[in-house]
Amino acid sequence: ASRRTCCATDSLHSTFPRHTPHDAAMRTMITLAVPAAAYVGGFQPLAHQVARAPIASTSNVQMVADMPKVRTAVIPTTDAKTYNLAANKVSKTDLTPEEVVYSLAQGNKRYVDGSGTAGASKKKMVDMLVEDPLDPTPVQAIVVSCSRSYAPIDQIFDAEPGSITALRVCGNVIQENDGIMGSAEFVLEEFDAPMMIVMGNENNDAIATAVARAMKAAGRKDVPEMKHLSALEGDSEESVNGLLKALEAPALDALDQAPNASFEELCTIAGKLNVWRSIENMLTTSRTTVERVRDGRLQVHGAYLGADGKVQMLGVHPTQEELIETLPSGEVFRTASDVAVPAEEALAALYAGNQRYVAGMAGQLDAYDENLLAAVTDGGQKPFAIVLGCADSRCPVELMFDGRPGDIFVLRNAGNTLVSEKGSTLGSAEYAVGPLDSKLIVVSGHTKCGAVTATVQTVLAGGDTASVGGSIGKVLDDIVDA
């Protein structure tokens, strides 16, 4: 379910446009014969490896039709009923978001009182956890919480196993296009859950470490000893642990709100602010979530779990209406904050992009989202590949590889040459390899190249490229050896 499972599921929101109709006719999926590295690792450039197409015909792509319709199966039973396995795949709850919240609150009350009933069924727990294909348990809520929580989420809310989809990550952090956001989107699409809860908790080690770091940076003398802080901070700003960076903002905000508060008080404030920050990330970057919140199919609430087991329901984000005013595009651009991509995966991404271009399926990206344009402008760059191509107007590199802004560092000149050791082309390539950390360089020639053709004609005619006027002769001279 994670966006990081493979390049396709890693970006369900961007790979398959929301407006694509699901007609009953045969649909096709372009599957690309790319190296196996394309399907592991989950780096951003590989987020659009697979594209759905109503029609595509080219020798460069392999067309895979939908599986045959699921046959109606006869299950031997006492009353000899006939079941359609496909029709019984998913069961959706009939509860409203308000009813789900009330149910969860009452369940937590039973948990705290020690009067829980969900586990009192006569059925064995293993039988309760095995999904019945003919009568699946409807998913009522998605709960995002910290990996280091006090008890299973189902137990905290005294809920029937299967009625809650629990997503757990250190610090209950949700970031743009991470595995938690992708998993939440999958559950929403698959089970149509009416409620999502982002729950922080007391005594959270990750929050405490981030708060201690913020206090240390502010010059506070009452910073408690955190044995893991130095290891997470690393030797430089670039080596700071990613989780610590993600929790930096709520920790600093807590210190701004209560500069004289004790360490314990700051941890509580930061924990709740982190809940709101995670919800903000969902409501500003997840198109699937915002669409459902807008039309009332989904509510996203904050919650805070105390050390005594009591869950404090915080309700919706205070500025939710402003957050959902702009519908996210569902797309993503690479910025300097992204990780470097191994050369094998970068090559697979370029190959896949070219196959979309050949199949006429390129150019699906909506690049006019203001937030995306601001991100790629202000967020720096981390291109996954460097491509040296010809300046010929018929060979636009980004289009040929179906690249997004921020994906490819492009160098172009007549004849795609690289001869001078002191030239700007080589210097530009070294800049991309060095500070930008690109792992792949591709030199791309093309058929009917004007510079190459002119050089061949000159040589065959017995002429000297050096005799060609202006700087053109120098360009042709770089191709003579070939």
Image (cartoon, rainbow, N blue to C red):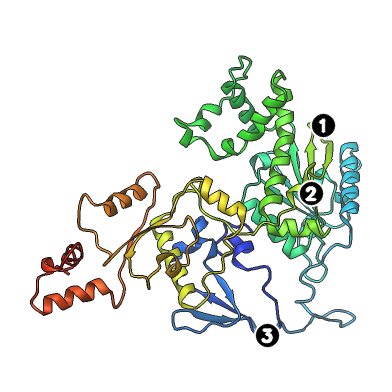
CA distance for labels 3 and 1: 55 Å
Query: Residue 207's quadrant in the figure?
Result: top right
* Secondary structure at numbered mark 3: loop
Q: Residue at x 61, y 63 (%)?
A: 14
- The residue pinned by badge 2 equals 321
Q: Residue at x 60, y 57 (%)?
A: 3
Q: Which mark is residue 308?
A: 1
CA distance for labels 1 and 2: 33 Å
Residue 241 pos. (x, y %): 53, 37
Residue 395 pos. (x, y %): 37, 71
For marks 3 and 2 on the same chain, the one whose residue lies earlier in the sequence: 3
> In which quadrant of the rendered image does the C terminus lie?
bottom left
Residue 30 pos. (x, y %): 53, 76
Q: Would you call the spot at circle 2 few (<14 residues within 10 Å), some (14-19), or many (20 or more)?
A: few
Q: Residue at x 64, y 27 (%)?
A: 211
From this viewpoint, which residue is outermost toward the left?
462
For marks 1 and 2 on the same chain, the one whose residue lies earlier in the sequence: 1
Which is more toward the observer, 135 or 476? 476
What amino acid is found at the position of numbered circle 3 in the picture? Answer: Ala
- The residue pinned by badge 3 equals 25
From this viewpoint, which residue is outermost toward the front?
469
Q: Residue at x 20, y 62 (%)?
A: 471
What amino acid is found at the position of numbered circle 2 in the picture? Answer: Glu
Query: Residue 27's quadrant in the figure?
Result: bottom right
Query: Residue 365's quadrant in the figure?
Result: bottom right
